[in-house]
Image (spheres, rainbow, N blue to C red):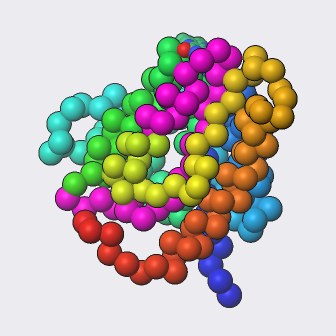
């Protein structure tokens, strides 16, 4: 029997039941409908240590514990509220600690991810593009339309409706991309 696809949703909001978590849930529900098993990690619960800034040194114990768990999954959804036109500080601490998964081994190479950001004014694309580019830089791959942002105060009409609809598309496409990637036993260069 084919192995189940597993996806970890990572909530970078200090609010464990806020708008960002709502968006994340939409992506994971869609991934479940496409056949995946899903789980949520709230960064607010993990006590992840602030990154020490030394390439040669291991991250702190809480961070390593989470990374060990994280590596078991085929794919990820990184969800962040926009804080001052940027990802939340919880998400930034995760991103900085992910430096551990950089050169020389790039252990997350080829794993799949999507990003969602939630805001009420501006900065959704900027914050999401930041997360997207860092993850790509450490070897992960996103499907088409891999970043969905939502501005709760924007008028919902035919031009903006994608901000609500594309969370479901993202969940489906992450599963699709994982299936494609699992079939390619290739070396991506590192
Ligand atoms: C410290 C802080 C900074 C924020 N900065 C922005 C911002 O730059 N742009 C914006 O649109 N919303 C900003 N917001 C609003 C949040 O992005 C918005 O309320 C979001 O929906 C919160 O998601 P949550 O419920 O998951 O925490 C900020 C909120 C906080 C607390």
For this rendering, which residue is in front, 43 or 169?
A: 169
Residue 141 vertical placement versus 186 (above, below):
above
The residue at 46%/62% (across/down) is 111
Q: Is residue 117 magenta?
A: yes
The residue at the far right in this view is 157
Whether the magenta-drawn stretch holds residue 62 is answered as: no
Residue name at image x 24 percent, y 45 percent: 58
Specify the quarter for ligand 1: top right
Looking at the image, residue 12 lies above or below residue 2: above
Residue in view at x 83 percent, y 26 percent: 156
- Image coordinates of residue 165 in percent, x first then y, are 79, 43
The image quarter in which residue 171 lies: bottom right
Q: Is residue 63 visible?
A: no
Please identify the quarter of the rendering in which residue 42 is found. Answer: top right
Residue 163 x/y as whole percent:
73, 35
Residue 128 located left or right of residue 186 = right
Q: Is residue 16 left or right of residue 183?
A: right
Part of the protein shown in magenta: 104-131
Q: Nearer the viewer, residue 59 or 146?
A: 146
Vertical position of residue 161 compared to residue 99: above or below? above
Q: Nearer the viewer, residue 171 or 73?
A: 171
Visible residue check, residue 143: yes
Q: In the rendered picture of this protein, how many numbered marks are placed on residues? A: 0
């Amino acid at each position: 029997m084919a192995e189940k696809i597993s996806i970890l949703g990572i909530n970078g909001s200090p609010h464990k039941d806020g708008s960002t978590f709502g968006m994340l849930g939409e992506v994971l529900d869609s991934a479940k409908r496409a056949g995946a098993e899903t789980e949520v990690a709230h960064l607010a619960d993990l006590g992840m240590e602030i990154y020490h800034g030394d390439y040669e040194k291991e991250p702190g114990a809480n961070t390593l514990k989470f990374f060990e768990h994280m590596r078991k999954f085929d794919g990820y959804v990184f969800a962040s509220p926009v804080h001052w036109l940027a990802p939340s500080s919880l998400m930034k601490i995760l991103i900085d600690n992910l430096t551990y998964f950089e050169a020389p081994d790039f252990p997350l190479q080829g794993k799949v991810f999507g990003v969602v950001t939630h805001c009420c004014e501006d900065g959704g694309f900027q914050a999401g593009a930041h997360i997207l580019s860092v993850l790509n830089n450490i070897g992960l791959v996103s499907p088409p339309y891999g970043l969905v942002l939502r501005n709760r105060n924007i008028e919902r009409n035919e031009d903006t409706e994608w901000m609500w609809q594309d969370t479901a598309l993202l969940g489906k496409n992450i599963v699709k991309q994982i299936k494609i990637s699992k079939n390619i036993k290739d070396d991506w260069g590192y």
